[in-house]
Image (spheres, rainbow, N blue to C red):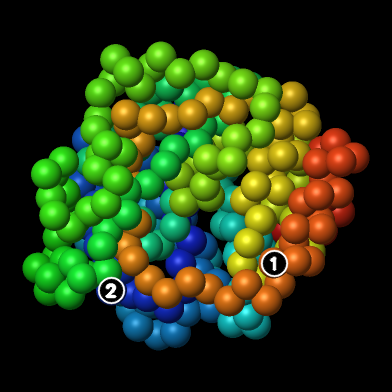
């Protein structure tokens, strides 16, 4: 099974630096790293070039012009560029636990996707974290909130069952799925621009296709760096698309990944 760690990013190279440090500190490495870049400037490109030169893991930088929040499009382009079997997806503001990739791979199964949660890093901790290049956090760290999410217990992790029902706990910053299942629903819906619901709408179509979802808890830990919320100006329109997907049990979007294949 060829695995890809997919990281979406936009103009925050300081955060991406820590994310990549954590990616290269894994107990089990992915076969490749895909960086889906929604129009970042030169500082991000220079950072990625530096990592490409020193990493033993192939790192692909997939970039598109900045025309506003078009995360769906760049994720589609990134996955279209890969021949991986399994995608482990995070955001460029989420540092990963050293066993993050191992956890996702170890409980992956055909006909199933995984979704995990995130540990929040507090706003007042950011300056120290960036200054000292910190990308590991203990259960007792004062820098984090919701610390029970920072418990890695494989015995408890493996007790969760797969379900055909949608969970409100799905977060695009911590999911994994088979590339063939992604292609079977035409990937992300590019009609959804601006922040909000693009991940959950995609997952609804995957569930409607018959793929089961399994919660990943006590494993697959990510640490979300605090930042101001994105604009929600398109949220109402995106919610309408998601509602239609849910009500009509859609499994396919017309404006998806196929145009890049």
Question: Can residue 189 be seen?
Answer: yes
Q: Is residue 69 above or below residue 255?
A: below
Q: Is residue 60 shown left or right of residue 253?
A: left
Give the x, y percent position of residue 79. 59, 51
Q: Is residue 249 shown left or right of residue 121?
A: right
Q: Is residue 160 above or below residue 248?
A: above
The residue at 55%/42% (across/down) is: 170
The residue at 32%/29% (across/down) is: 218
Q: Nearer the viewer, residue 151 or 44?
A: 151
Work out how far the residue at label 1 is from the one at label 2, CA to CA, in angstroms.
28 Å
Looking at this view, name the residue that lies furthest to the bottom: 42
Residue linked to disc 1: 235
Give the x, y percent position of residue 208. 78, 31
Q: Is residue 172 shown left or right of residue 217?
A: right
The residue at 43%/21% (across/down) is: 107
Q: Is residue 160 above or below residue 200?
A: above
Label 1, secondary structure: give it. Answer: helix
Give the x, y percent position of residue 13. 33, 74
Q: Mark 1: few, some, or many residues within 10 Å (few <14, many ≥20)? A: some
Residue linked to disc 2: 14
Label 2, secondary structure: give it. Answer: helix
Which image quadrant is residue 51 in?
bottom left
Give the x, y percent position of residue 64. 59, 74
Q: Nearer the viewer, residue 91 or 120?
A: 120
Residue 32, label in figure: none
The residue at 47%/79% (across/down) is: 40
Q: Nearer the viewer, residue 17 or 197?
A: 197
Looking at this view, name the residue that lies furthest to the right: 248
Question: Can residue 223 be seen?
Answer: no
């Amino acid at each position: 099974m060829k695995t890809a760690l997919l990281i979406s990013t936009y103009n925050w190279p300081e955060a991406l630096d820590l994310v990549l440090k954590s990616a290269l500190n894994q107990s089990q490495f992915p076969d490749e790293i895909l960086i889906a870049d929604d129009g970042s400037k030169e500082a991000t490109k220079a950072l990625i070039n530096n990592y490409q030169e020193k990493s033993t893991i192939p790192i692909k930088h997939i970039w598109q012009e900045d025309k506003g929040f078009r995360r769906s499009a760049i994720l589609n382009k990134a996955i279209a560029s890969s021949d991986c079997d399994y995608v482990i997806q995070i955001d460029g503001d989420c540092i990963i636990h050293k066993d993050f990739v191992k956890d996702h791979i170890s409980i992956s199964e055909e006909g199933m996707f995984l979704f995990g949660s995130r540990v929040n890093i507090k706003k007042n901790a950011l300056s120290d974290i960036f200054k000292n290049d910190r990308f590991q956090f203990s259960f007792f760290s004062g820098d984090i909130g919701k610390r029970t999410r920072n418990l890695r217990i494989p015995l408890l992790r493996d007790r969760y069952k797969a379900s055909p029902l949608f969970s409100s706990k799905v977060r695009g910053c911590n999911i994994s799925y088979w590339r063939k299942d992604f292609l079977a629903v035409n990937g992300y819906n590019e009609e959804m621009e601006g922040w909000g619901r693009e991940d959950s709408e995609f997952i609804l179509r995957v569930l409607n296709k018959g793929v089961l979802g399994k919660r990943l808890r006590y494993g697959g830990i990510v640490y979300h760096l605090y930042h101001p919320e994105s604009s929600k100006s398109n949220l109402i329109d995106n919610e309408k698309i998601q509602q239609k997907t849910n009500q009509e049990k859609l499994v396919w979007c017309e404006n998806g990944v196929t145009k890049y294949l």
